[in-house]
Amino acid sequence: MPSVKETLRNKNIALGGWCQIGHPAVAEIQAQSGMQWLALDCEHGEASEADIGDFCRATIGGGAEPFVRVRANETLDIRRALDLGATGVIVPLVNNASDAKRAVAAAKYPPKGIRGFAFQRGNCWGRDFDAYAATDDTRCVIVMIESREAVENIAAILDVEGVDGVFIGPYDMSGSYGIVGQTSSPIIVEACAKVAQACLKHGKAAGQHIVTPTPENIAAAKRQGYTFIALGMDTYFLANGVRTALEMFNG
Ligand code: 3PY
Ligand code: MG
């Protein structure tokens, strides 16, 4: 199977899963079920930095690529996620080109960036040091567009070299437009369409999280040209499965 990076470069859909529960079994199950990539949510989930290594082991063991949504656009959060074996980072709250440059710099080795060299899990604890250091470009930097400011600056953000694509955060975006939680309001729909169109124009991947998948929202995401798609979420699948079984039981 091509890597996520190659899939996105070829303008194909890279379908992934979302892990808010830190336990590696949750990643293993989603990976074994056929997801191409999984993201460990260190911003809003239960996972912490100490969970990243085992998340990467379980995800790769299950046949998927490990991504980390880092806690914040902080150099060390991005460096640690990659060092622990993530092949991509999803960076929250990128509002302008300078935020995007900061995220890319953290993810790239000099001279392109400021990532520190070391023996670490990502390079098999040093065994593959040279090969790993020479392949920065195989790893993804996805920036989150989740504010009005980011929508207004979308062209400048996409112009930043090293940004592979964007991932829309509809909830934060709704908050920044003063309509908290109204993610299907025409204002947010229009903002998302603007972002998706800008991605198509710049040849970069447009991403979104279909938190509660339905035939309609899946069809809409495909139609609108999104290629970096997270489908569902561990917590949602679990709660939904429990509710469905209870309904079946209770008639
Ligand atoms: C948001 O909607 O703001 C998110 O970050 C979703 O993951
Ligand atoms: Mg958010």
Image (tube, grey):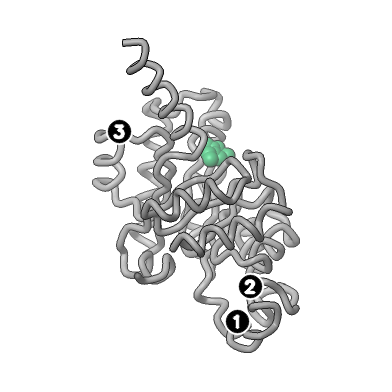
Q: Nearer the viewer, residue 119 or 77?
A: 119
Residue at image mark 1: 132
Q: Is residue 181 above or below residue 104?
A: above
Helix, strand or loop at mark 2: helix
Which of the labelled discs sits on residue 122, or is there none?
Answer: 2
Residue at point 36%, 55% (across, down): 34
- The amino acid type found where label 1 is placed reads Tyr
Residues packed near mark 1 inside 10 Å, few (<14), some (14 to 19) or many (20 plus): some
Residues packed near mark 3 inside 10 Å, few (<14), some (14 to 19) or many (20 plus): few
Residue pushed farthest top?
Answer: 251
Helix, strand or loop at mark 1: helix
Q: Is residue 211 above or below residue 229?
A: above
Q: Is the residue indicated by label 2 positioned so its CB lies within 8 Å of ligand 1? A: no
Q: Is residue 149 left or right of residue 165?
A: right
Observer-side mark, 3 or 2, equals: 2
Residue at image mark 3: 214
- The amino acid type found where label 2 is placed reads Gly
Whether pointer 2 and pointer 1 mark residues with C-beta atoms closer than 8 Å, the reply is yes
Label 2 vs 1, first from the N-terminus: 2
Whether pointer 3 and pointer 2 mark residues with C-beta atoms closer than 8 Å, the reply is no
Q: CA distance from mark 2 to mark 1?
A: 8 Å
Residue at point 42%, 65% (across, down): 4
- The amino acid type found where label 3 is placed reads Thr
Q: Nearer the viewer, residue 107 or 26?
A: 26
